[in-house]
Image (tube, rainbow, N blue to C red):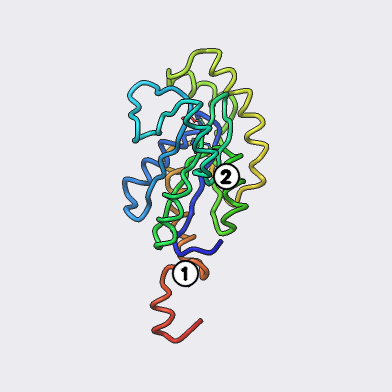
């Protein structure tokens, strides 16, 4: 499917720092919009319905799947998560950029639909560091952390499906990497041709 805007998809195992990086990027990049997913997981800590996620019941999620409301959805760590089709299509068809923070299964589904989507995978520098970040975060019980670590091994094996890889050892460097990818993507011929069609037309070039 062709569209004017850029669609960035960021995936990573829990604890690799994906949300912090995407939030920091959003603060300095007003052209990017964030998509709010639906999930059947219960809210954690300070999470607010409509901000981090739309928190829905299993029955509501089933209903949304039946209504074909999701661009992609996947089961992750025992819960279901889905990206709203309408919000994404509306924004990128109008030339806006969007960033999705989803798991690798969702990222691969998105790439099948939007072949121009830019898939970015964030890796932790080591398993030890990933475990200590999950423990420091203090959001999950020990058994949940164990499950997330076990799942992480399968998740990182999917990195070969991605266009870019960031190793998040130092936050500032990883943020620089992420900004660079977004910036470079916007300067590619195909992206400029799509987003700046008026300039190309005025210059009388293809
Ligand atoms: P958490 O429960 O820690 O918020 O998220 C667990 C995992 O689900 C993370 O990897 C997160 O990026 C992913 N996730 C969040 N929203 C979506 C979505 O809409 N689709 C898919 N496939 N994964 C999602």
Whole-percent x, y for residue 173 in the image: 45, 43
Tag 2 residue: 107
Q: Specify the quadrant that holds the N terminus.
A: bottom right
Q: Residues within 10 Å of mark 2 (few under 14, many from 20)?
A: many
Instruction: Reply above or below: 79 against 51.
Output: above
Q: Is residue 12 above or below residue 9?
A: above
Q: Quadrant of residue 11?
A: top right
Q: Are marks 2 and 1 in contact (CB under 8 Å)?
A: no
Residue 120's tag is none
Q: Nearer the viewer, residue 106 or 82?
A: 82
Element on which disc 2 rests? helix
Question: Which quadrant of the view contains residue 42?
Answer: top left
Front residue of 177 and 20: 20
Q: Residues within 10 Å of mark 1 (few under 14, many from 20)?
A: some
Farthest top residue? 142
- Residue named by callout 1: 194
**Residue under the point 54% across and 30% down:** 80
- Return the x and y of residue 114 as percentages of the image width and height: 56, 56
Dot 1: element: helix
Disc 2: residue Cβ within 8 A of ligand 1's nearest atom: yes
The image shows a total of numbered marks equal to: 2
Position in image of residue 147 (x %, y %): 59, 20
Q: Confirm whether residue 51 shows in the render.
A: yes
Q: CA distance from mark 2 to mark 1?
A: 22 Å
Q: Residue at x 37, y 40 (%)?
A: 23
x, y percentage for residue 86?
Answer: 44, 50
Which residue is at a point 51% across and 70% down the rendered structure image?
A: 189
161 left or right of 54 in image: right
- The image quadrant that residue 38 belongs to is top left
Mark sitting earlier along the chain (2/1): 2
Pick out the residue farthest to the bottom: 204
């Amino acid at each position: 499917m062709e569209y004017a805007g850029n669609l960035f998809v960021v995936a990573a195992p829990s604890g690799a720092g994906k949300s912090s990086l995407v939030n920091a990027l959003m603060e300095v990049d007003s052209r990017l919009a964030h998509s709010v997913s639906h999930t059947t997981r219960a809210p954690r800590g300070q999470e607010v319905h409509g901000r981090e996620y739309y928190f829905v019941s299993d029955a509501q999620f089933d209903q949304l799947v039946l209504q074909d409301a999701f661009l992609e959805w996947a089961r992750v760590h025992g819960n279901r998560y889905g990206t709203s089709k309408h919000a994404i299509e509306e924004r990128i068809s109008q030339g806006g950029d969007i960033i999705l923070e989803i798991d690798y299964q969702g990222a691969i589904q998105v790439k099948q639909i939007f072949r121009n989507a830019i898939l970015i995978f964030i890796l932790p520098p080591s398993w030890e560091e990933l475990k200590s970040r999950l423990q420091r975060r203090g959001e999950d019980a020990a058994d949940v952390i164990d499950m997330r670590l076990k799942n992480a091994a399968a998740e990182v094996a999917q990195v070969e499906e991605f266009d870019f890889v960031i190793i998040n050892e130092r936050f500032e460097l990883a943020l620089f990497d992420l900004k660079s990818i977004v910036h470079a993507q916007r300067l590619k011929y195909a992206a400029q041709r799509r987003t700046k069609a008026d300039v190309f037309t005025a210059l009388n070039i293809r």
